Amino acid sequence: MTSKPANAPQDIKLEASQMANSHPSSPLHVPEQGRTRLSGMRSLQQPAQKLKPRRKWFIFLGSLALLAGISFATIQLLPSKTGATRADWILHTVSKGNLIVAITERGTLEAAENKDVSCQVKAGKGSTIATTIRAVLVDDGTRVKAGDQLIHLDDSGLQEQLKAQKIVRDKAKNEWNNAVQDLEITMSQNVRDIATAKVAEELAGLDLNKFREGDLPQQMNEIKGRVLIAESDLEMWKDREIWNDRMVSKNYRTGNQAMADRFKQQSSQLALKKVKEELQVLEKFMAPRTTKELESKLVESRGNYSTKLIQASAKEKQNRGDSETKESVFRQEQQRCTELEEEIRKCLITAPQDGLVVFYVPDQARFGSGSQQSIVAQGEPVREGQKLMRIPNLDRMLVNVRVHEAMRAKVRGDVFLGMTEIHPLFALGCRSQLARLIHESCYSLERESYGQFTPIKVRSGLKAQVRIDAFPNITLEGHIKVVDEVPAASDFWTSDITVYRTMVVIDEGLSTLNAQELQLKPGMKAAVTISTDSKVENSIIIPLQAVQGSHKDGFKTTVKTNNGTEVRDVVPGLSDDKWVEIKSGLSEGEVLIMNSTDGGGKANLGVAQQDNKGASKGSGKEGKGTSTPPTTKATWPKS
């Protein structure tokens, strides 16, 4: 009885060893070296009856624990053939829902209606700097009333200009009485100049008529007469050539004599050609040139005569009205003094309306670009027209965000129809040419009044939800008002990224919310979620984690079935960084294994994910889904 417990561990170990050797695929399989060691153990266990009873029981219990651990690990590692659920699986039940594409960006809160406080002092010649700030009388964020003093600009330079201008004004007043003595001399000189110009005009007219009616016909007739003589000589020498041929054939004349007459014939031909060219030159060049020259002299003389008349009248009026002219100069200088006094008054800037003072920071200064940085502080230079402060209407707010170029095509603002769009539509309705002519004529006459035409809003921008960082529990509804067509200025850190400024208006009335202590102020940071037109409804929506593969190898997912697991091909549709639409391959109610790697690793949906990463990089903010099925919001589409 006492020997059996001592031999029990040995029997169990032998059975385990035989099982491992008979089943090579088993996790308990022992290699050849292990068998040698095991046989050695058998030889050592033969004197086991000599061990103490407590030590034998420890060996027995340890062997049982080792076999139990090996068996449990084997069961967990072997594939399930009966459809049992493993403890490390993350399961998801397939269901239908809605997937709405959205863009989440961060921006800065601004007032939709602002009264800008700018520098109205004019800059000097050759400079864009108007003056400097002497003192800032209010702090940023101070509430003011209409008429309160805000900024005092330096007016010392304008005071000096005013003193110098008063001296110029006095000189203009003294010059008022200096032109009366030149009146008689000017009148006598005007009479002589007018008479001389009149004689020159008459002589130019006579020269032109003389050339047209006398010299030109005479020269043309003389040349034409020479043409007739040359033609007669040429005909004579042609007859002479025929006569010479007969005489030479009868040996009455020699060949040299006939050759000499032939040369004379050629000379007459050249003479005729020369006379004709002379006639041609006269008709085409000399006659038009001489006529043009004489006409020019006539026009010049007439212009000179008219100029003398105008100059005489101008000089007479100048001398007779010199006192009035000097008086006008004096008034202009006096007006300049008044303008300088007005510029001095503009150096003291007051609030145009009640509201909250916000120091104006341009985009160049906000993003670290631009050659000039506008700072509202004592001693800082101020340019003409530079915006210094804003007094916003806190009841109408908007968010200034920047959308990455990859998302620019997916957002749109309010669409308006102005006169430039309406005018072609009316023109299309005019079918007859007369109707179109009347329409164009009326449009040209009333073009200036059309400039006051208020554009008609035909379509609102995309809806958006605004969440202020200072009030994270409140979501405000809004829509896109405008999206810039040109990229916004980039700063040093994002010089290689293109973004577009987008204005999102908060539609809810803020007067009631402000009364509820929701004090929105310009400059607050906010997150804006823009809902685009890309969406799917009542479709299979599963987590993106459950899809593996790529466009090249295909997309797969692992489905839990009654017989185990199944890797199934799927066709993805619209997706974001959390959820994906499945067009085919899955049915509602099936169970997916989200952490399975049988499908080949995490899915790569290609262009859509690249667009999402680009958007996150461009704006410094990451677009994310805002809810889970049945309604899920995404940041980019994939179709």
Image: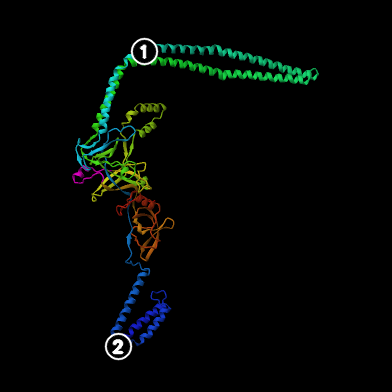
SS class, disc 1 = helix
Residue 2, label in figure = 2
Q: Which residues are magenta?
A: 505-523
The quadrant of the picture occupied by the N terminus is bottom left
- Classify mark 1: residues with Cα within 10 Å, few (<14), some (14-19) or many (20+): few
User: Tag 2: residue type?
Assistant: Thr
Decide: few, some or many residues near mark 2? Use Cα within 10 Å; few <14, some 14-19, many ≥20: few
The residue type indicated by label 1 comes to: Ile
> Could you tell me how far apart the alpha carbons at marks 1 and 2 are, in whole angstroms?
161 Å
Residue 438: mark in rendering:
none
x then y, percent, for residue 227: 64, 16
Residue located 38% across and 74% down the image: 27
In the rendered image, is residue 101 in sight? Answer: no
Q: Which residue is more in the foreground, 338 or 233? A: 338
Q: Quadrant of residue 285?
A: top right
CB atoms at circles 1 and 2 under 8 Å apart?
A: no
Q: Residue 589 at what x, y percent from top left? A: 33, 59
Q: Is residue 545 above or below residue 372?
A: below
Q: Residue 506 magenta-drawn? A: yes
x and y percentages locating residue 435 in the rendered image: 39, 27
Q: Which mark is residue 185?
A: 1
Q: Quadrant of residue 232?
A: top right
| Residue 499 x, y percent position in the rendering | 35, 46
**Res 361 seen here:** yes
Q: Secondary structure at mark 2?
A: loop
Q: Looking at the image, is 556 positioned above or below residue 376?
A: below
Residue, x 43% and y 16% (percent of image)? 304
Seen from the viewer's position, the closer of residues 319 and 621 is 319
Which comes sooner in the sequence, label 1 or label 2? 2
